[in-house]
C-alpha cells in the first residue's frame, strides 16, 4: 500500500494504485463514517471530503491575486501555479480530498498584549510547538489507518501547509467552513482558530456539501486591521498585512507601515480575534499548542544572538524566519514602545552586519529620541551610512 507524506514537491512521489474501484457505494459510505470517527479519536475537530476538482473558481481568484501583485515577495505562490490553482492537477490519480481541522483556540484574548509596550506580541499559533509537525504526525496516523481499512490498492498523499495546495477553498468545498471577509476559514462550530491538513487519496469517498458564507454585513475583521490590508471584503493585499510583513517580507519594511506594527513581532491575530463566530470556538485539545513563548520582554529578545535565538525558539515556527528578520521586527517594536529606556537596548544593533537590522535600530532610536534619523548619524559607522 503506497503512502506518501509530503510537505513540498509532489512531483517526485511514487504513483499509487487505483483504490476504490471494486468497492460499492455502501461500503465507501461506511468507510467514510468510520474515518470520521477515527479522525475525532485522533484529535481533529472536524473533517470534510470533496473532489479534487471541486474548486474550479480557485484558479481565477489566484490569477487575479498574483496579477495585482498582492502576494508581495511570496514568489513561491506564482511557482507551479497550475498545481496551486487546480488541485486535480496536483495528483491526477486522486479521487477524494479529505480536509481536517485542528483547533488551537487561545484561552484569552490575544490582543491584550498590544497594551504592553515593553512586551512582544506573538501570534497565537506560534506560541506553542510547530503546528507543521503536530498536524503532520496526526495526519500520517489517520492516513495509515485509512490504508489499512480501505481498498487493497489504495494510495494517499498528505499535505500540511507548505505544499501547493489551496487548503481554504478545498475546506470550504468539503463543508468545514467558509472563507470569511478576512480570507481565513471560519466555521459556525469552530470559530476561526484552527489549522488545516489535507489527505489526497485514490479512494472515491462520498463528498460532503460545500459551505456558504455566513458573514452577512459584519465588517469586524476588516475594520480592526491596523494597516488596512483588505482592499475589499474577501480580498487581501498581503503587502500590507502584518503577518506577511513580519514573517515573509525580507529586508526593511516600508517606513510608512512600521509604526502600524506596534509591538507585533511575529504575525497578527487582530482580524481572527475580532470575528463574532469565535463565540462558538472550541478549546484546543493538543497540549503542544499551549503557550511556551507567551509575551517576552523586548529587551530580552533584542539581546539574542543567532545561537541564543535558535535555542530560545527551538521547535517553534518562529525559528523559520531566522535571527535577522526576527531582530528587525523586535527593533521596530522597540521603536513603537515609547520607552526611552530601550534606546540603549537598540543602540548596539546600529552596526549589525544585516542592513535591515541596522536600519531598524536607527529607526527605533530616532523614534524614541523624537528626532530625525539624520541627527543620530554620527553614531552609525561611516561605511553603513547612506
Image (cartoon, rainbow, N blue to C red):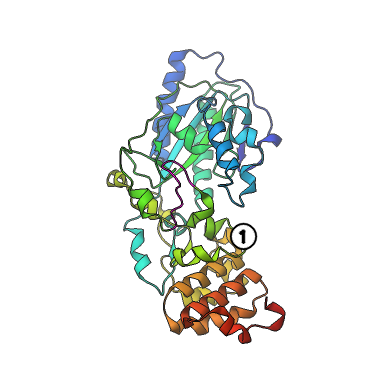
Q: Residue furthest left?
A: 279
Q: Position of residue 28 (x, y in %)?
A: 46, 19
The answer to whether 96 appears left or right of 193 in the picture is right
Can see residue 79?
Answer: yes
Can see residue 293?
Answer: no
In percent of the image, x 41 and y 67: which residue is there? 295
Quadrant for the C terminus in the image: bottom right
Q: Is residue 235 magenta?
A: yes
Q: Give the mark count.
A: 1
Q: Position of residue 71 (x, y in %)?
A: 57, 47
Q: In the rendered image of this protein, does residue 203 appear above or below residue 342? A: above
The answer to whether 18 appears left or right of 257 in the picture is right
Q: In the rendered image of this protein, does residue 16 appear above or below residue 239? A: above
The image quadrant that residue 321 belongs to is bottom right
Residue where numbered disc 1 is placed: 250
Within 10 Å of disc 1 (Cα), the crowding (few <14, some 14-19, many 20+) is some
Q: In the rendered image of this protein, does residue 308 appear above or below residue 83? A: below
In percent of the image, x 43 and y 25: which residue is there? 32
Q: Secondary structure at mark 1?
A: loop
In percent of the image, x 48 and y 12: which residue is there? 24
The answer to whether 118 appears left or right of 385 in the picture is left
Q: In the rendered image of this protein, does residue 334 appear above or below residue 321? A: below
The image quadrant that residue 215 belongs to is top left
Q: Position of residue 108 (x, y in %)?
A: 31, 58
Q: State the residue in front, 343 or 188.
A: 343
Q: Main secondary structure of the magenta part?
A: loop
Q: Which residues are magenta?
A: 227-236
Q: Position of residue 170 (x, y in %)?
A: 49, 32
Quadrant for the N terminus in the image: top right
Q: Is residue 40 magenta?
A: no
Amino acid at each position: 500500500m503506497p503512502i506518501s507524506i509530503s510537505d513540498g514537491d509532489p512531483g517526485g512521489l511514487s504513483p499509487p494504485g487505483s483504490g476504490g474501484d471494486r468497492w460499492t457505494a455502501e461500503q465507501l459510505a461506511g468507510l467514510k463514517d468510520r474515518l470520521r470517527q477515527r479522525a475525532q479519536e485522533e484529535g481533529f475537530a472536524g473533517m470534510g471530503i470533496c473532489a479534487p476538482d471541486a474548486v474550479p473558481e480557485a484558479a481565477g481568484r489566484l490569477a487575479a491575486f498574483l496579477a495585482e501583485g498582492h502576494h508581495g515577495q511570496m514568489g513561491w505562490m506564482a511557482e507551479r501555479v497550475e498545481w496551486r490553482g487546480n488541485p486535480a492537477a496536483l495528483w491526477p490519480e486522486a479521487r477524494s480530498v479529505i480536509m481536517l481541522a485542528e483547533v488551537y483556540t487561545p484561552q484569552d484574548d490575544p490582543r491584550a498584549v498590544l497594551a504592553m509596550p515593553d512586551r512582544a506580541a506573538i501570534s497565537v499559533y506560534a506560541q506553542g510547538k510547530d503546528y507543521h509537525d503536530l498536524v503532520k504526525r496526526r495526519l500520517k496516523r489517520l492516513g495509515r489507518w485509512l490504508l489499512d481499512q480501505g481498498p487493497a490498492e489504495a494510495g494517499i498523499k498528505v499535505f500540511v501547509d507548505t505544499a501547493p495546495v489551496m487548503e481554504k477553498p478545498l475546506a470550504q468545498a468539503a463543508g468545514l467552513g467558509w472563507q470569511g471577509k478576512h480570507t481565513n476559514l471560519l466555521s459556525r462550530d469552530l470559530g476561526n482558530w484552527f489549522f488545516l491538513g489535507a489527505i489526497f487519496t485514490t479512494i472515491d469517498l462520498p463528498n460532503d456539501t460545500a459551505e456558504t458564507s455566513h458573514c452577512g454585513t459584519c465588517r469586524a475583521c476588516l475594520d480592526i486591521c491596523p494597516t488596512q490590508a483588505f482592499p475589499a471584503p474577501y480580498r487581501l493585499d498581503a503587502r500590507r498585512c502584518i503577518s506577511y510583513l513580519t514573517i515573509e517580507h525580507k529586508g526593511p519594511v516600508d517606513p510608512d507601515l512600521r509604526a502600524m506594527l506596534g509591538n507585533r513581532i511575529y504575525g497578527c491575530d487582530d482580524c481572527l480575534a475580532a470575528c463574532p463566530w469565535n463565540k462558538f470556538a472550541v478549546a484546543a485539545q493538543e497540549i503542544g499548542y499551549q503557550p511556551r513563548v507567551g509575551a517576552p520582554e523586548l529587551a530580552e529578545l533584542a539581546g539574542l544572538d543567532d545561537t541564543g535565538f535558535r535555542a530560545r525558539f527551538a521547535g517553534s515556527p518562529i525559528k523559520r524566519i531566522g535571527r535577522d528578520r526576527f531582530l528587525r521586527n523586535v527593533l521596530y517594536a522597540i521603536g513603537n514602545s515609547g520607552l526611552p529606556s530601550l534606546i540603549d537596548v537598540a543602540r548596539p544593533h546600529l552596526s549589525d552586519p544585516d542592513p535591515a537590522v541596522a536600519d531598524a535600530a536607527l529607526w527605533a532610536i530616532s523614534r524614541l529620541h523624537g528626532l530625525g534619523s539624520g541627527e543620530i548619524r554620527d553614531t552609525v559607522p561611516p561605511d553603513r551610512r547612506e
